[in-house]
Amino acid sequence: MIKIGIVGGTGYTGVELLRILATHPQAQLTAITSRKEDGLPVADMYPSLRGRVDVAFSSPEKAKLHECDVVFFATPHGVAMSQAPELVAAGVKVIDLAPDFRLQDVAQFEKWYGMPHTCTDLLKEAVYGLPELNREAIKTARVIGNPGCYPTTMQLGFAPLLKAGIVDAANLIADCKSGVSGAGRKLDVGYLFAEASDSFKAYGVSGHRHLPETVEQLQHLTKDKVGLIFTPHLVPMIRGMHSTLYARLTKEISNADLQALFEDAYKDEPFVDVMPFGAHPETRSTRGSNMLRIALHRPADCNMLVVLVVQDNLVKGSSGQAVQCMNLMFGLDESTGLMHVPVMP
């Protein structure tokens, strides 16, 4: 059994980790931290976990995280990098769901997150946790920077095209929408029901924190300089993410060959479903699951390719992907504990 600790277990990504790990056959939940909720049974806060999770929250000082095999950080930025060195020195693997170990460019991290990076030594060895593109490195990693939700959709949607060298890498466009849970469990006027319901808006148009992360990773896939316009939107639903990606083709290629390119790229991937050409994947087709679905479109047979990507932002976009990485790190089949069928309707 894998002894697991979770730092920051009261937020949406934290409870999603608990939901997934509660039925994982090799997971032993050992410590769930929350300074505010110290001593409160987890199931009292989240009744959905009654009969599944019998541990209580404990303050960070009481939690014996150094006795765990792996610790997940479901916390705001800055927390993981302050605690990771001590844990790694004790032989504990670290998976950070926040951005502390995503960006190798320290200057970019400090620019976008407004704080100095205090753990640059571990950052150098940290592995970016997108299994479909980085599987072998994840297997031997001590520290994982779990990808952001938007970057997961953009990278998996653009990757086959950039690897094949058939699109204009300098002029990629991503028009992305996320449910309100992507903002986390917090009191903020903009995310109250009366504010977010029956409305639709873009945000971060002039710049979003997930942009440098995505560009840094996409750049590994091509020798051409990557340029990306990324516009996120908030939609009035709880969970789900839909990214509409645009890329200009630079070589003559048929629709059938484009479809074959994606099918070949992801044919062995348990959590990427390449749908038939021209399909319209819906966010509800992935809700509650670790599945990501992709469909290709080519309007009027022009030189623009449209890639539709959907996922559950809390699962494949966050906690499910983190468990997928954990499975790889401990030599398990990466789908272990993650074969949940999406919830419909």
Image (spheres, rainbow, N blue to C red):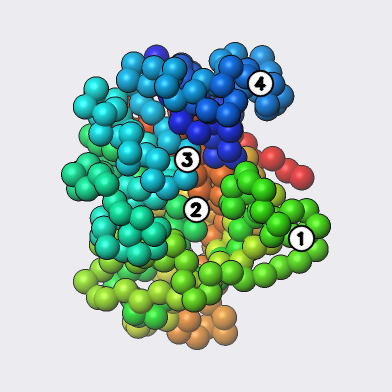
**Position of residue 240 measured from the top left corner of the image (x, y, whole percent):** 63, 52
Binning the other alpha carbons within 10 Å of mark 2 as few (below 14), some (14 to 19) or many (20 upward) gives many
Q: Which mark is residue 149?
A: 2
In terms of depth relative to the viewer, which is nearer, 78 or 233? Answer: 78
Which mark's residue is nearer the viewer, 3 or 4?
A: 3
- Could you tell me the amino acid type at mark 2? Cys
Q: Are marks 2 and 1 in contact (CB under 8 Å)?
A: no
227 with respect to 142 (left or right): right
In terms of depth relative to the viewer, which is nearer, 73 or 328? Answer: 73
Q: Which residue is mark 1?
A: 195
**Position of residue 124 measured from the top left corner of the image (x, y, whole percent):** 20, 48
- Give me the C-alpha separation between circle 1 and circle 4: 29 Å
328 with respect to 180 (left or right): left
**Position of residue 246 measured from the top left corner of the image (x, y, whole percent):** 48, 75
Earlier in the chain: of badge 3 and badge 4, it is 4
Q: Is residue 340 above or below residue 293?
A: above
Q: Residue at x 57, y 84 (%)?
A: 300
Q: Which mark is residue 43?
A: 4
- Name the quarter where the N terminus is drawn: top left
141 with respect to 274 (left or right): left
Q: Is residue 179 above or below residue 145?
A: below
Q: Residue at x 32, y 20 (%)?
A: 66
In terms of depth relative to the viewer, which is nearer, 13 or 166? Answer: 13
Earlier in the chain: of badge 1 and badge 3, it is 3
- Give me the C-alpha separation between circle 4 and circle 2: 27 Å
Q: Which residue is mark 3?
A: 75
| Local secondary structure at mark 3 | loop
Binning the other alpha carbons within 10 Å of mark 3 as few (below 14), some (14 to 19) or many (20 upward) gives many
